[in-house]
Each structure stands twice: as C-alpha cells, then as structure tokens.
Image (cartoon, rainbow, N blue to C red):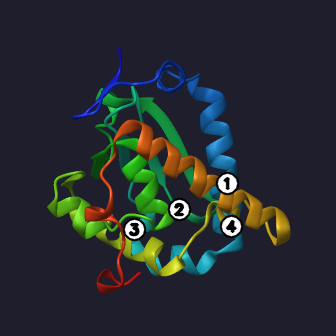
Amino acid sequence: MTRHRDCGELPPVVALLTKPLPRRPLELILTRLVRQFVERRPELIERLGPTAQVPIAVVPTDLPHAFIVNLDGPRSRIDVVASDQATSAAARIEGPLLILLGLFDGSYDGDAAFFSRDIAIEGATQHVLALRNTLEEADLTPAEFAGLSGNLAEIVNRRTAEALGLARRLLGAPAADIRATPEHGR
C-alpha cells in the first residue's frame, strides 16, 4: 500500500488515486494547459530567462511518476515519466504531492518547506529558485492556470482550496510550520 511519510496507510480512495496513470493522455492534457497558460502570461517566461529552456523534474515522493516541466514558450510541455526515470532534468524538486501543489498555489512557503526537509532540491538549484521566484511573483490560482475567470474561477479556486485542505488533514501533511506567512513574502 502507498504510504506518506509519518502518515500511515492512505484511505482506499486516495490510495487508488496514487496508482500509475496512463502517461500519454495526462501528458497531452498538462502540456495543453501549460502552453495555453504560457500564451496568456508570456511575461512569466521572460522573467525565467534561460531557465525557461531547462527541464525541471517535479517528483512527488508519494506517487509512482514524476513530471518533467519545460517552460519554453510555445514549445512548453510536461512529460510524465516513472519517478526513477526523471534523470534527464537539470534540476529536481522532490516532496509529497500535497506540499508540491501547495508550493504552486502559494499555500506553502518554499523556503520553509526546504529547511524543514519536507522538500528536497537537487541539481542546478538556481533554476528551481528562478522557477520558485517566478511562480511566487505570478501569484497563480488553479483557475488562472486553467484559463478560467469570473464566478467559475471563484468556485474552482474555493473548491480546490477546500479539497487540498481536506486531503492535507486526511493524510497528515505538515501544517502551519511550512505555510506561507507574511514574513515570507505572501
């Protein structure tokens, strides 16, 4: 059974979600989303500079696969690979999925997560830092990433926050000690 560090067994529904996913359809969906996002927010890719051409592996330690993120303008893509095959990336960030998602949406502070050892960074860390700084400045929401606006965006953002909060409580993910705080720029 899939386990999260210090959390015991996962509830059956969550354990089912951690099974390997069909890689190709997931790659196509994620690549389409990231390309549309990059088209809407080209200033973020400009801010990344040379990091935009550098593949960065995002490796959820509680899933059997990893995501190789390439944010190179219209050639942006996300490749889904087995966790142990995420070796082609110049940099690598590892941690539980819920914490990695929290870094993306700003509910977790990257510095605090790193220093508390809830995430690990390897390789060309300057690229991970550039990506982190760009994401932090962008102040992204799930709805914005998906290209939603108006009432639908508000609903998606609220429901996503509720779902992630519930999942964190169910799985015993770290709480306030790594949440973004005003001292950390959020």
Disc 1: CA contacts within 10 A as few (<14), some (14-19) or many (>=20): few
Q: Nearer the viewer, residue 42 or 136?
A: 136
Residue identified by numbered label 1: 159
Quadrant of the image for the C terminus?
A: bottom left
* Identity of the residue furthest to the top in this view: 1
**Residue 118 appears left or right of 141:** left
Q: Amino acid at mark 4?
A: Glu
Q: Secondary structure at mark 1?
A: helix
Q: CA distance from mark 1 to mark 3?
A: 26 Å
Among the two numbered marks 2 and 4 on one chain, the one whose residue lies closer to the N terminus? 2
Circle 1 or circle 3, nearest the eye: 1
User: Where is residue 15 drawn, in percent x and y?
Assistant: 46, 21
- Residue drawn where x is 62% and y is 34% of the image: 26
Residue identified by numbered label 3: 131
Q: Nearer the viewer, residue 78 or 107?
A: 107
- Residue drawn where x is 36% and y is 84% of the image: 182
Question: Which dot marks residue 144?
Answer: 4
Disc 3: CA contacts within 10 A as few (<14), some (14-19) or many (>=20): many
Residue identified by numbered label 2: 72
Residue 7 seen in this snapshot: yes
Q: Are marks 1 and 4 in contact (CB under 8 Å)?
A: no
Disc 4: CA contacts within 10 A as few (<14), some (14-19) or many (>=20): some
User: Where is residue 59 drawn, in percent x and y?
Assistant: 35, 41
